[in-house]
Every structure is written in C-alpha cells, then in structure tokens.
Image: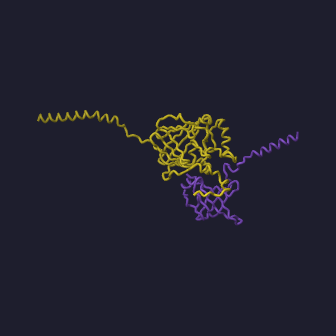
Amino acid sequence: MKNHIHIIALVITILAVVSIPVFAHHGASPYDTSKLSTLKGTVSDFQFINPHVEISLDVTNEKGKVETWIGEANSPNVLSRHGWDRDIIKKGDTITVIGNQGKNGSKTLRLQKVILSNGKELDPNSITD
Amino acid sequence: MRNRLMIWTFALSAVLLVSSALSPQLHAQQETAPAQPATTAPDLSGLWSRLRDAAVPRGYEMYILDYGKTDSPMTPWAAAKYKITGAMYHGDDPSTVLSDPVFQCFPPGVPRIYLFNFPVQIVQIPGQVLMLFEYDHFIRRIYTDGRPHDSEQGPLWMGDSIGKWEGDTLVVDTTNFNDKTFIDRVGRPHSDALHVVERMRRIDQNSLEIAFTIDDPKAYTKPWGAKLIFESKPTWKVLEQICEDNASFIGLNEKATQPLKKKK
C-alpha cells in the first residue's frame, strides 16, 4: 500500500513538472518591468524601421569587455510624430539608455529613456496626447 | 388729352397684365426653390489620432490595451472565456499570448481597431464614409446610401457597416461579425451575435468623438460602451504600417540570440 502511494506521488510530481509551459520567452512581456537598468555606450547601429526602432549599443562592462546591447523602442510611425527621425542618433554617438532588461537575462532592453551626449532626453515610447 | 390718358391706361394695363402673367412663374420658382439655404452635410473627414483616456494609467501597455474603466457585465459564457483569454495579458503565462489572432495579422475587429496607436483617415464620398486606418492599411466602408445590411457575405472579421446621419452624428450599425476577434487587448470576448453601434460626430473643428456600444446578449448581460476622442492631425500623413513586420518580430529575447539583420 505504501509503495503504491509513493508511486502515485511520484507520478503526480512528474506530471506537475512536465506541465510547466515550455515557451518561456513568449511571455506577456518579455521584459522585467519591475526594475530599470542604465547603460552608457557607443551606438553601433540605429535602425529607424518598423516594427520597433532599435539601437545597438557597445557597452564596456566592469571587466573592461565590450558587449553589444540592443534597445527596443516604439514604432518609427509613432516616434517620427514626437520629434524623432532617422538621423537623431548616429553610429559613433555616445548615449545613455535606461530600460527594462529581457527576462531571460539577455543583453536586451525595452527602452524607457534615451539621453544624448548633449543632454537631450528622448522618449522611446512617446505615448503622449 | 384723352388719347394720352387712353395710352397711359393701356400701357398700365399691359404692364399689369404681363406682370400678372409672369407672377405665377415667379411664384412657381419660389415654391420649388428651397425655403432656406441648404444645410451643409456634416463632415467627419480628416486625419484623426485617438487621445488617451485620462482614466487609463500612463504607460505603453495600458494605452493600447482597453478603453479605460468600463463596466462590461459578462454572461457566464463570456466569463468562462475571459478567464482564459484575460490571463494572456495579465499573468506570466508564457504560452497563450500568441494565440491572439492579431499576432498572426488577422483583422482586429471593431472597436478594437481603434486601440492601435496609429491614426485613421476619414474620407466621405457619395454613399460611403471610408475609414482608412494606418494600422495594417485596413479600410472600413460605411455605406450611407440607405442599403440594408449585407446578407450575402459573412460572418466577417470586421463586420458589415451601414450608417445614417442623425443631425450632426453619423450613426453606424455593424453586424455580421465572426467570433474570432476580441473587443480589446485585455481579452474581453464576444460572440458572433455581436452588434456594434457607433455614434460619430465632430465636436469641434479639431475633435472627433466616437461613442460605441457593444450589444451582444450571448456575452454581456446588458449593452456597454465607451467614448473615444480623436484629435485632428492635419500636418501628419498616413505612414506605412505592415502587420507582418510585427508577426515576424516575437521579442528581442529571441533576437538577442541572433545577429541583428541589416534591413537597409
């Protein structure tokens, strides 16, 4: 009788583990909206295209190694109506970005603020009336 | 003297005779002409961008998810569906969000199409009011020529719309929906009995109001709705927006493991 209970418990545990959804990166939001990260670096690419404007940023980490981060902003359709254009950021620019990192720990950010080298602040969401 | 008198009398009579002969025609012209100048037909045309509802908290997601604090009393049928579909956007369940058909670029339905953060161009032509959406270049045709609802097509993703003017308001009646869309992006469901009524009017030169009502007895115990306000954007133009760009972009979490593709 005890053996049967142990087997049933084991089966239930296995079933519980297996039923955890596998596609962990298709979450309702792939970004950790509970905290913000700040990075300063050199722009290596700026794609002002749909569906999301993307900034590639070369950032030197604490160990002196250069890592490339990708920051995602809103659609250029929205941003171009709020002061952005394809030349607002250029390769080689030094900028600071603030955003939510990808939940899987990848070097990706959903951008919440962009600060240019001249101090100008840009809103990468631009959901204003 | 008498001759002159006769001539004047004759001339006066002739004038009176001619004028009395003419006057019925003048009267007739006045009777067929409008009693007052024709009123200008209401004009909703322009490029319109929806203003965020002040009740909806600031933030990218909430702006596009739903219509603010609206009461939507669900039937048990709808509540059971909403338990699953609502969880798509409220929880951390990673596997269901992509089952929303908009992620495969199916039409968003009405009124959900108003929730996308892209403007709509309204064009009025005889017998139709056209709504040209920047979002995935959708067109809604609202027939104002008095025709009944289309009985030949359907059910349809975007429904079938007919409209009639009530004073300054275009009252749009849309039916013949399929049940594959959501009312909004928090997962509120509807059935194929959905009937949407929109009241569209220009509040002033720069503002448009669209008040919609959801009437779906299978899903909601009573009609409910919301008012959407749009601002005129005469300096904007409709830009290209291709839904498939989003469908192939399923999150930077995947992109981060691939090299950034050069799209220029």
Q: Which residue is drawn at 54% across and 51% down?
A: B240
Question: Which one is in front, A13 or B242?
Answer: B242
Horizontal side of residue B82 vs B19, given as left or right: right
Q: Which colour scheme is used?
A: by chain
Figure quadrant of residue B224: top right
Chain B palette colour:
yellow
Percent across and percent down for residue B82 are 66, 40
Q: Colour of chain A?
A: purple
Tally of numbered tags: 0
Q: In which quarter of the image is the C terminus of chain B?
A: bottom right
- Name which quarter of the figure residue A54 lies in: bottom right
Between B188 and B126, the one lying in front of the other is B126
Q: Which residue lies furthest to the left in this view?
A: B1
Q: Which of A8 and B37 is in front in this view?
A: A8
When the figure is inspected, residue B258 is found, relative to residue B175, above or below; the finding is: below
- The picture places residue A80, in percent across and down from the top left corner, at 54, 55
Q: In which quarter of the image is the N terminus of chain B?
A: top left
Q: Give the answer, above or below, for where A61 lies relative to A30.
A: below
Measuring from the top left, give residue B226's x and y in whole percent: 57, 42
User: In x, y percent, where is residue A24?
Assistant: 71, 50
Q: Residue furthest bottom?
A: A64
